[in-house]
Image: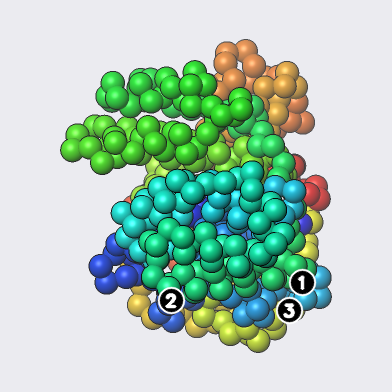
Amino acid sequence: MTAVLSTEWDSVRQRARLSAQAPEGTAPVERLSELGRAELLGRLRWEVIQGGSLFLTYPQLLDGAAFAVFRPAALLDELAVRAIGGGAVLPIRVSSRNADLAGQLIALLSTGFLFSSLPVPDEQCVRLQRELAVRADAEGAAAALAAEGPAGMADRLLAATGVLDTPLRRRTVARWSDWLEAAERGLLEVSSLVPADYATAYALRPPPRPEDLAGDEGRAVLDAWISGELDVKGLPNRSRLYERLDPLLRSGDPVARADAQTLRDSFDETYYRAIAVSEGCLLGLASPRRGVRRREASTLVEQTPVVTYPTRFELRLGLMSAAQWQRYTDDAAEALTRWWQQRDLAALQEVGDLLAARTKEPPAGGVDDVSVTRLQRFAQSARGVTAQMVAGGGMSLATSLLGEGTSGAFAAGAGGALAPVVVAAVAAGVTRLTGFRGRYDVIELPGVLGRAV
């Protein structure tokens, strides 16, 4: 099994997703509708099917609006798979400095972190960040944590700012405590941080080129990024890049906004790919909007193996009760194991067929309910040059990525055939994706098809 690290659970994305369900749309909701909860749960279950477990960075968990809604005890019944640990543990691994989740939370509160998960407007989040920064005492945090405990210290640090009202502050501390207790009880795995592998991430997908951007402001930020100006301790720093991009994203100039979004999307992908490479995870690149990668999607059916899942399969998964999920994964256990260990597409199809047999079509959906997940691999040439094989590219794409004269070496290094691209799932009934306007996600798989990972 190989855990999935998904950009879907980026804390900023979680905030945007749950804010969209609020009447005003300015802050994430604290309580989801039945449908909204099913959509999130279905997404989590689909990722468990993809890799066997989820890998989360500590901000994704501790500052995730979605994980503020879910409670670990309930999620254990709704997400655990008996084929993994007998169903007694959550299929979740979270990384934290020194494998200390409580210490990591206090470190966030002691250094002026900008929280995205709080159900308050952006301006209030920024004010909290500033107040925490004014009171920052990273050196004294360890001693205070030992004396007060994580819940007591977190409550004191938040209360000192005066930004959150008392009921919200207590709810916030309580949900953090739930996850910290789950970690202490071994309901989820906490591992030590591993340095992100930016060298490999950049080799797999370089930053945008200056000519990819339309304005001078965007090119200036790009130059700061690739020159190392925004690095901290020799590594790219996402917070510093965000600070440089924020004025452009808020600009009245559409060119500046478009360039800023391009840079942000590219860096986020690099950031998560660097972590996935170092942790040996599958990387889930969640589509942020309709029509993403549509040109690539239009060629997939004719050129790649296709596994067909029932329409709105994520929602079908999310609408299952805990008992139904357990029965489903029990019956699919053999196929799931073959998929996780051997990447056998026939096994993944069996899992989809069982889902179709066990569930009914959810209420009304349109074109946006069509979703495609493409599984792809990175492969390395005999010369040590790494390239990404994407749909519709073939040898010409390998040449464009590796340079003239290297594609032959690449093919030889890959055993005489370029690394295949596989569509893992496409909604039932869709035979041509030329007019596709739904969500199009990509999952990058480590290893080699047909071998256990």
Residue farthest along the top direction in this orientation: 405
Quarter occupied by residue 376: top right
Quarter occupied by residue 53: bottom right
Q: Nearer the viewer, residue 410 or 122?
A: 122
Reading the image, the residue beneath label 1 is: 185
Q: Which mark is residue 37?
A: none
Q: Secondary structure at mark 3?
A: helix
Assess whether mark 1 and mark 2 are in contact (beta carbons under 8 angstroms): no
Q: List x then y, in percent, for residue 298.
A: 42, 47
Compared with 326, 402 (above or below) is: above
Reading the image, the residue beneath label 3 is: 331
Q: Secondary structure at mark 1?
A: loop
- Bin the neighbour count of mark 3 within 10 Å (Cα to Cα): few under 14, some 14-19, many 20 and up: few
Q: Amino acid at mark 2?
A: Pro
Q: Confirm whether residue 382 shows in the render.
A: yes
Q: Residue at x 59, y 20 (%)?
A: 402
